[in-house]
Image (cartoon, rainbow, N blue to C red):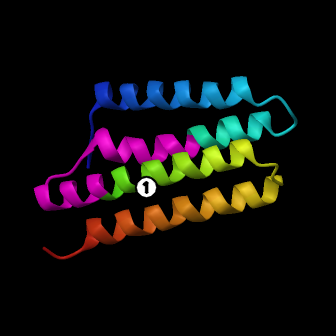
Amino acid sequence: MKLDKIKALIALMVCVLISYGFYNFRVDQKQLLLTFGSFISLFYTLIFAIAVSHDISRTKINIRTLSFIFFPITLISNLIFFFVDFSSPIYTIFNGIILLIFTLFVYSIKNAKQ
């Protein structure tokens, strides 16, 4: 796996801007949790979608497709939490499970025999 630094920087900036939007429009006790949680979950999926490349093209296509599927899922889940009153443990557990499932799929694709 190789990381393209320019694309990683673009992914970082996109996620910072989205997280800043969450920070600006939500003013309550959960503002920081939603800001940092959305940044981590969005950046983790977007970095695999645009900045990480693999030696085998089939693996690269599968991981990018999976990442482009999970990025909107995490964005939509964070938007739902943005508009709904939620408890911190539920938000943390839900986003953690989504990221762990994504990590499991990426790991399985990467280690699949060609």
Q: Is residue 30 above or below residue 63?
A: above
Q: Residue furthest right?
A: 29
Residue 89: x %, y % from top left: 80, 58
Left or right relative to 48: residue 30:
right
Residue 104 location (% of width, % of height): 43, 69
Q: Residue at x 55, y 30 (%)?
A: 18
**In the depicted structure, whether residue 80 falls above or below residue 8:** below
* Residue at image point 45% right, 49% down: 72
**Identity of the amino acid at label 1?**
Phe
In the image, is 57 to the left or to the right of 108?
A: left
Q: Is residue 63 left or right of residue 17?
A: left
| Viewer-nearest residue: 95 or 53 | 95
Q: Is residue 47 magenta?
A: yes
Residues packed near mark 1 inside 10 Å, few (<14), some (14 to 19) or many (20 plus): many
Q: Main secondary structure of the magenta part?
A: helix
Task: In this rendered view, identify the residue nearer to me: 94 or 105.
Answer: 94
Q: Quadrant of residue 93?
A: bottom right
The image quarter containing residue 30 is: top right
Relative to residue 60, is residue 19 depicted above or below? above
Check disc 1 and report the residue beneath it. Answer: 70
The image quadrant where one finds the C terminus is bottom left
Residue, x 62% and y 59% (percent of image)?
96
Span of residues in magenta:
40-65
Residue at the limit of the structure toward the bottom, as seen here: 113
Reply yes or no: does residue 50 show up in magenta.
Answer: yes
Residue depicted at x 62% and y 26%: 21
Q: Is residue 7 among what the camera can see?
A: yes
